[in-house]
Amino acid sequence: MEVGILGGTGPAGQALAARMASAGLTVVIGSRSVERATDACEDIAKRWPERELALVPGTNVDAARTEVVVVATPWDAAAATAASVAGELAGKVVVSMANALVREQGEFRPVNPPEGSVAAAVQEAVPTAFVAAAFHHLPAKALADLSRPVEGDVLICADLAQAVEKTAELARRMPNLRAVHAGSLACAGAVEAFTAVLLEVNRRNKARATIKLVGID
């Protein structure tokens, strides 16, 4: 499977790219600047020289031409970035992983976008795409550290079964991650907002905690 990451040069995008590539996926790191995308690919390769990572630098347009596309930009740029490559995203599964958060009075706090969630804003910006919300609760540092497995549940919110299934397949490609259907896109706001709580748990406890649900076979 070939996966593209819009805004893949940021911490979250690079971390997910490294983890997916380590699982044998080909990942196109997209950016407004090919030079920045090239630097990101080289940085990851230098960090893990013993691994054969299929990372390809490109523009956001290049990333949008892949089979599955992940939006990893800052939350307030997610919808606009997706809209800028809307023609390439038509009929594809697009995974929104951004969380609407701000840092106030020393802690992370959720923001409620007008559309209800970042994922809903992406869907509104690209109505012909099949948007899913996922990968919010995986700490970037844990994802980027390929010397250790990252464990947890990937909560997936989407309106269409196709989006849920393709996103779940992507999550299952990475060892120790379990895909869990967590409702329609209307539920994405709650999933995104909880990331603020998880970040505070990790910050205050100097941890890399993720979400793991019990009682699911």
Image: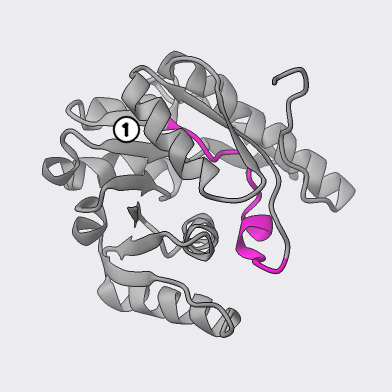
Q: Position of residue 84 (x, y in %)?
A: 18, 47
Between residue 106 and residue 30, name the one nearer to us: 30
* Residue hosting label 1: 122
Between residue 28 and residue 26, name the one nearer to us: 26
The local secondary structure at tag 1 comes to helix
Q: Position of residue 209 (x, y in %)?
A: 78, 44
Q: Residue at x 47, y 57 (%)?
A: 13
Between residue 63 and residue 98, name the one nearer to us: 63
Residue type at mark 1: give it.
Val
145 falls in the magenta region: yes
Colour theme: one colour
Which quarter of the picture shows residue 95?
top left
What residue span does the magenta drawing correspond to? 133-147
Q: Residue at x 67, y 59 (%)?
A: 141
Report the residue that reaches farthest toward the left: 87
Is residue 105 in sight in this rendering?
no
Q: Is residue 48 left or right of residue 43?
A: right
Q: Position of residue 117 (x, y in %)?
A: 45, 25
